[in-house]
């Protein structure tokens, strides 16, 4: 089992910035991908950004150039730096741990991000 604890959501004005954090604990295997997904009301949960244990990254087209994903040296905490936020970024943001040894996914509880003036 892997437990994920997210933090950093909140209310921000358009053009502002937020930094989300997600820390994994438990059976954190070396081969993994950590990612951020988001879900707005009535919408599907979509990938925002992801980073492999080797440091490779991928981003949704809608956030390229505005968001940056990174990991700490222990590789159990992932960050999402969100800049130039837009109202359409409003959603619940979820952290995901993909275990590529046991082939199982784990999700955090979600953190609300609201972009509004």
Image (tube, rainbow, N blue to C red):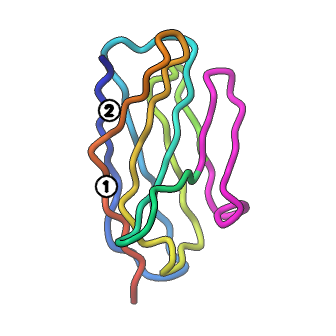
Quarter placement of the N terminus: top left
Is 58 a magenta residue?
Answer: yes
Left or right, residue 117 beside residue 15: left
In the image, 113 versus 46, the foreground residue is 46
Q: Residue at x 68, y 28 (%)?
A: 55
Query: Disc 1 designates what residue?
Result: 111
Quarter holding residue 22: top left
Do the numbered discs 2 and 1 sit on residues whose CB atoms are within 8 Å?
A: no
The range drawn in magenta is 49-68
Query: Which residue is farthest bottom?
Result: 117
Q: Does 42 sit above or below residue 93? A: below
In the image, which disc is placed on residue 4? 2
Q: Residue at x 52, y 40 (%)?
A: 35
Q: Secondary structure at mark 1?
A: strand
Quarter placement of the C terminus: bottom left
Categorize mark 2 by other alpha carbons within 10 Å: few (<14), some (14-19), many (20+): many
Q: Position of residue 105 (x, y in %)?
A: 43, 28
Q: Position of residue 48 (x, y in %)?
A: 57, 54
């Amino acid at each position: 089992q892997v437990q994920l604890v997210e933090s950093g959501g909140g209310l921000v004005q358009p053009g502002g910035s937020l930094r989300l954090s997600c820390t994994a604990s438990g059976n954190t295997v070396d081969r993994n991908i950590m990612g951020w997904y988001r879900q707005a009301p009535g919408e599907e949960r979509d990938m925002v950004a992801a980073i492999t244990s080797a440091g490779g990254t991928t981003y949704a087209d809608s956030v390229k150039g505005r968001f940056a994903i990174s990991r700490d040296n222990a590789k159990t905490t992932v960050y999402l730096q969100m800049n130039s936020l837009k109202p359409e970024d409003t959603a619940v943001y979820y952290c995901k741990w993909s275990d590529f040894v046991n082939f199982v996914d784990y999700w955090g509880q979600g953190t609300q991000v609201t972009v509004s003036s």
